[in-house]
Image (cartoon, grey):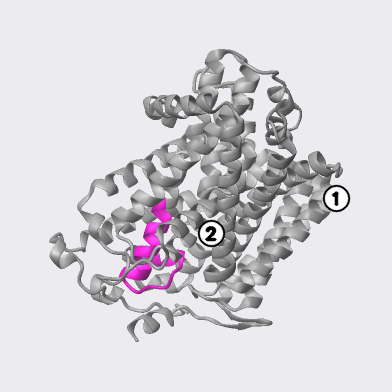
Amino acid sequence: MQERAVKSRINVCRVGPFPRVNPPVFISSALVVVAFVLFGVFFKDAAETAFNALQGVITHYLGWYYMLATSVFVGFVLWLLMSRYGDIRLGDPHEKPEFGYFSWFSMLFSAGMGIGLLFWSVAEPMYHYLSPPFAVAGETQRAAEVAMRTTFFHWGLHAWAIYVIVGLALAYFAYRHKLPLAIRSAFYPLLGDRIYGWPGHLIDIAAVFGTLFGVATSLGLGVQQVNAGLAYLLGVPQGLGVQIGLIIVITGIATASVLTGLNKGVKLLSSLNIWLALLLLTAVLVLGPTVYIFNTFVETTGRYLQNLVVMSFWTDTVGQSGWAGSWTVFYWGWWMAWAPFVGMFIARISRGRTVREFTLGVLFVPTLVTFLWLSVMGGTAMFHELVGSGGIAAAVESDLTTALYVMLDRLPLSGLTATLATLVVITFFVTSSDSGSLVIDMLTSGGELDPPRVQRVFWAVAEGFVAVALLVSGGLGALQTASIATGLLFSVVMLLMIVSLLKAFRDEPINPTVRDREPKAPSETYGDVEHPRGAD
């Protein structure tokens, strides 16, 4: 009864064909999405100019902020891991997790990396090999070493630390203090009952934008790679028209998955996705330069750890090459844009785990798996570039989307592995789309754990339209700008989220035997706060 009373504080009602939405968040988000799609499709030249200008301004003037904020996120998570708050359970004192470890890891990895990791696992090391950072000469042995550790850096602890903060804040306040599973709930210690008014609405709207544009960026990258795979396998032409058609088809598949819910479609597709990815990983590991791959994994992990602090704060102050803005700032913005989506999804599947178990599982396990993936795919490409017939770096320079298939072409059974890779991209595409639409629906329906199906369909289709608009109005550059801009907005939310978590943790009993008491309603923990006028 207590949980229902708290959840009812967010006004949820019917709006047109959508039976249960929070009107301020849903209507505002939907109108902006429609306006953005129309602007991107019908005024594509103006949109492309605007995207390029915005990206230049942000990377030039605020690159330092992205580097500093992301380092703060990593530091906070590492502190949290060693703190006395690790025994706090995200739920009732003796509650068991809803999902086993394999299903849990499968779903969070599929949601957290997905298409992007497959797209960049070969392309990024090759690109850095040609044009490395830190004033290193390109196409040298030193460039190869720097390229691999830099790729590890962009896909390592920083990305997952961002997800830990958002996911933990959501799970803690939802399952420990019985607040709705919504981004606004993480700010109850700071805002009190104002989270149910416009301050809370604005927080959720920012989260919707971050999720929508972050997922759309991945869908845009994914459809380009699916197109490249079909061109390699079947001779399908590469072009915008084909890519729009692919978005429509795969969005339809994702919509069908969304309709079946989390325990059916999303869970099954995530597990299938992971099995296919493991099969591809194993095939390349066995058919490729196996010893070289393991050497790459061990050595590059060491170089990554050795240079972690330097890379975390490198802004290219002296060189002014623009490299950090084009790469690191883009990645940090992308992860921040994805944070509300991945954080919400991870929180949804993590009830019953302790803070320490959650942090260890979300921070380190996916990072190690990601490093292994990059070592297998990127390491194989680097081996053939340095020792074999070469040509992979040149292919990347010509067309990023073909990098994976050019690498696979150097291996035995290339047709089979290329087919498998295309299937993995498609399943990553679908899991990103269906998970993203489910999360957006939860955000726009006041934290409903199982929103009505018609709303999920709307957001799945909206993601597809936004991806189309970004492709039409600037391709990869527009996709990057969308991530950087929405990430900037949500980074402020995340910094305040840390402050809110620290305030809440201070109210937790220090004695572990007392800490596992029954969770309290927020008013019992933080005191009664007068309801503001018009909170609903």
Earlier-in-chain disc, 2 versus 1: 2
Residue 209 lies in quadrant: bottom right
Q: Residue at x 16, y 63 (%)?
A: 509
Residue 316: x, y in percent? 51, 23
Q: Residue at x 64, y 22 (%)?
A: 384
Residue 64: x, y in percent? 47, 34
Amino acid at pointer 1: Gly
The numbered mark at residue 206 is 2
In the image: residue 530, left or right of residue 34: left
Q: Is residue 320 above or below residue 3?
A: above
What's the distance in space between the residues labelled 2 and 1, CA to CA? 31 Å
Q: Residues within 10 Å of mark 2 (few under 14, many from 20)?
A: many
Front of the two marks 2 and 1: 1
Amino acid at pointer 2: Ala
Q: Residues within 10 Å of mark 1 (few under 14, many from 20)?
A: few
The numbered mark at residue 241 is 1
Q: Is residue 55 above or below residue 261?
A: above
Range shown magenta:
164-185
Quadrant position of the N terminus in the picture:
bottom left
Taken as a whole, is the magenta stretch helix, strand or loop?
A: helix
